[in-house]
Amino acid sequence: MSSIFSKIIAGEIPCYKVAEDDKHIAFLDINPVAPGHTLVVPKREVSYIFDMDDQELAEFNVFAKRVAKALEKAIPCKRIGMTVIGLEVPHAHIHLIPINVEADMAFNKERPEVDKTLMQAIATSVAKEFV
Ligand code: 5GP
């Protein structure tokens, strides 16, 4: 059975895509903890990030760095925070979150749905900065 992220990668479910290469994709989290909250996902469906082999994990992190650099340019913030949880979706992913204060990284707060037009505008602005 394929994960919800594999369905996104296959184009069966829409997403607000910000970046892609042959092995990875990055798209906005549907329930962002902060504006620009992005998920970086390997196209190969592996449940647990630390089951990735060394080279795959290294390439995944380098791709995440490129996405973080695009986020830095597109979203006013002090830093890009990075975290891995993986308790909800069993398909490895890195959360990249533009932050100004530590509380911006908090997952256990209310995460109101963001207007679709704003989500698309954020994704487009990050995608433009991705190199
Ligand atoms: P985790 O597995 O790291 O605990 O959390 C999974 C994350 O994926 C959550 O932040 C959740 O909002 C996000 N998420 C779950 N389903 C979807 C989806 O269908 N599309 C997108 N863009 N994000 C999702």
Image (tube, rainbow, N blue to C red):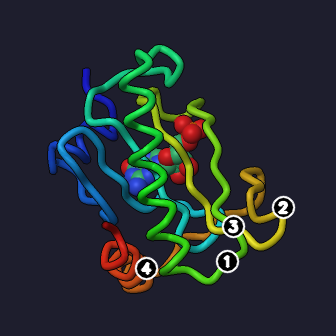
Which residue carries the number 3 mark?
Answer: 79
Name the residue rendered at 46%, 27% in the picture: 90
Identified by mark 3, the residue type is Arg
Q: Secondary structure at mark 3?
A: strand
Specify whether 130 is left or right of 95.
left
Which sits earlier in the primary sequence, circle 3 or circle 2? Answer: 3
Residue 102 disc label: 2
> Left or right: where does residue 103 sit relative to residue 107?
right
Residue ID for mark 4: 122
Q: Earlier in the sequence, mark 1 or mark 2?
A: 1
Residue type at mark 1 is Cys
**Amino acid bearing label 4:** Ile
Residue 46: name its quadrant: top left
Q: Are marks 3 and 1 in contact (CB under 8 Å)?
A: yes
- The x and y percentages for residue 105 are 74, 57
Please state which of the two labelled residues, at mark 4 or mark 3, is closer to the viewer. 3
Q: CA distance from mark 4 to mark 3?
A: 17 Å
Between disc 1 and disc 4, whose residue precedes?
1
